[in-house]
Image (cartoon, coloured by chain):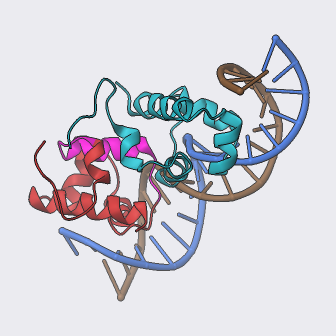
Chain colours: A cyan, B red, C blue, D brown
Amino acid sequence: MDVRARVGQNVQKVRRDKGLSQEELAHRANIHQTYLSGVEGGKRNPSVLVLARIANALEIDIIDLFRTHGKGPSL
Amino acid sequence: MDVRARVGQNVQKVRRDKGLSQEELAHRANIHQTYLSGVEGGKRNPSVLVLARIANALEIDIIDLFRTHGKGPSL
DNA sequence: CTGTGACTTATAGTCCGTA
DNA sequence: ATACGGACTATAAGTCACA
């Protein structure tokens, strides 16, 4: 699966878990809702700095945005 | 620590572990040596697609590029 | 072999409207 | 609240000469 889709799905999942709207998250991460929409949809190719801002706004580590769906048991 | 530095250090470490030169890796990842240098030095802000190419050329998962230094505990 | 500055071209990321 | 598109601007991508 494309990394962009992987990341996008993770962003969307965490965002929904936290009960945030795209607008809310976008605001917190200081990016645009329309852009966030594209990222979640795997249609954008974000830079690491933007991903870091998103991860930060979601209160997770950026590394979690790259985990494969299904499980992330590890430690 | 800045994500870019984190990623850069990881790229450099893995590259050296594999005994590759920047030129070699850059060639495999289809990027320029000078650009790779900037990424390793944490001076560039690469997109996920570029990181994916680098990770692929290093034969590792892109997620490993975001790990914090000090550990690389198998899986 | 690697790092830097300068540069051009491509695209990330914004902002507007609309559905 | 989310997605899509167009037009725009900021910055990443990609290349080079040289230290």
Q: For the point 44% across and 68% down, which residue is it?
A: B43
Q: Which residues are magenta?
A: B45-61
Please provide percent x and percent y for residue B57.
22, 44
Please provide percent x and percent y for residue B12.
23, 63
Please provide percent x and percent y for residue B23.
23, 59
Residue B59: say if magenta. yes
Q: Nearer the viewer, residue A63 or A45?
A: A63
Q: For the point 10% across and 59% down, which residue is it?
A: B17
| Above or below for B15 versus A43 | below
Q: For the point 28% across and 28% down, which residue is it?
A: A71
| Above or below for B26 versus A43 | below
Q: Quadrant of the N terminus of chain B?
A: bottom left
Q: Nearer the viewer, residue B59 or A10?
A: A10
Q: Nearer the viewer, residue A7 or A17?
A: A17
Q: Nearer the viewer, residue A18 or D1?
A: A18
Residue A13: say if magenta. no
Q: For the point 36% across and 39% down, which residue is it?
A: A66
Q: Is residue A38 left or right of residue C19?
A: left
Please provide percent x and percent y for residue B41.
35, 69
Q: Quadrant of residue A18?
A: top right
